[in-house]
Image (cartoon, rainbow, N blue to C red):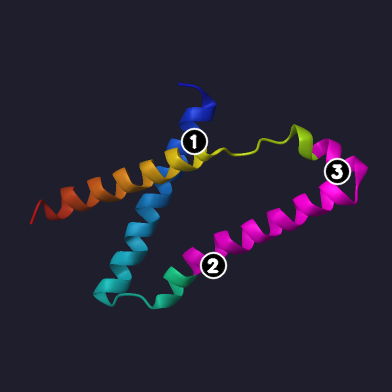
Amino acid sequence: MTRHTTLPLLMGAAMGAMMLMMLHGLLTGESSGAALALFVAAPAAIAALALAAAFFAARLSPRLRRLAARVHRPSLRHAGQMLGAAALTAGSIHLILHGLT
């Protein structure tokens, strides 16, 4: 496995465990909805910043345009690997702790 395969899988596994922990705290009343809102809002804010920077680089700055051409751009396969690993990790942890019932 190459770095381009293992990195999305590891990041997805960490994301699945974190999501399950936050959701469990919300469902059991141990935490407020702020943790879950932050879990959703932080990636959305980062994505908006990345899109704004990409727009700036592509339209206004020739130097940043050359830099953006060399940067890794995640593919749909990359996102699928991350989401699949997140789902498998969360499902595995849930089944280990609670069983099939």
Task: Judge whether 15 appears above or below 27 on screen.
Answer: above
Q: Residue at x 33, y 48 (%)?
A: 87
Label 1: how many residues lie within 10 Å, few (<14), some (14-19) or many (20+)?
A: few
| Residue 15 relative to residue 78: left or right | left
Q: Which numbered tag is attached to residue 6? A: none
Label 3 environment density (alpha carbons within 10 Å; few <14, some 14–19, many ≥20): some
Mark in the foreground, 3 or 1: 1
Which element is circle 2 on?
A: helix
Q: Is residue 98 above or below residue 12?
A: below
**Residue 2 appears at what percent x and percent y?**
50, 22
Residue 30: x percent and y percent?
A: 30, 75
Q: Quadrant of residue 72?
A: top right
Residue at 76%, 50% in the rendered image? 54
Characterize the magenta stretch by its predominant secondary structure: helix
Residue 53 lies, with reference to residue 35, above or below; the image says above
* Quarter of the image with the C terminus in it: bottom left
Q: Is residue 17 left or right of residue 101?
A: right
Coordinates of residue 44 in the picture (x, y in percent): 58, 62
Q: Nearer the viewer, residue 50 or 24?
A: 50
Indicate the quadrant containing the N terminus: top left, top right, bottom left or bottom right. Answer: top left
Question: Magenta residues?
Answer: 38-67
Which residue in the structure is indicated by mark 1? 77
Q: Nearer the viewer, residue 100 or 75?
A: 75
Residue 94 included in the magenta stretch of the image: no
Closest to the camera, between mark 1 and mark 2, is 1
Instruction: From the image, tell me which residue sits under label 3.
Output: 64
Query: Label 2: which residue?
Result: 41
Quadrant in which residue 20 is drawn: bottom left
| Dot placed on the residue nearer the N-terminal end, 3 or 1 | 3
The numbered mark, 2 or 3, whose residue comes first in the sequence reads 2
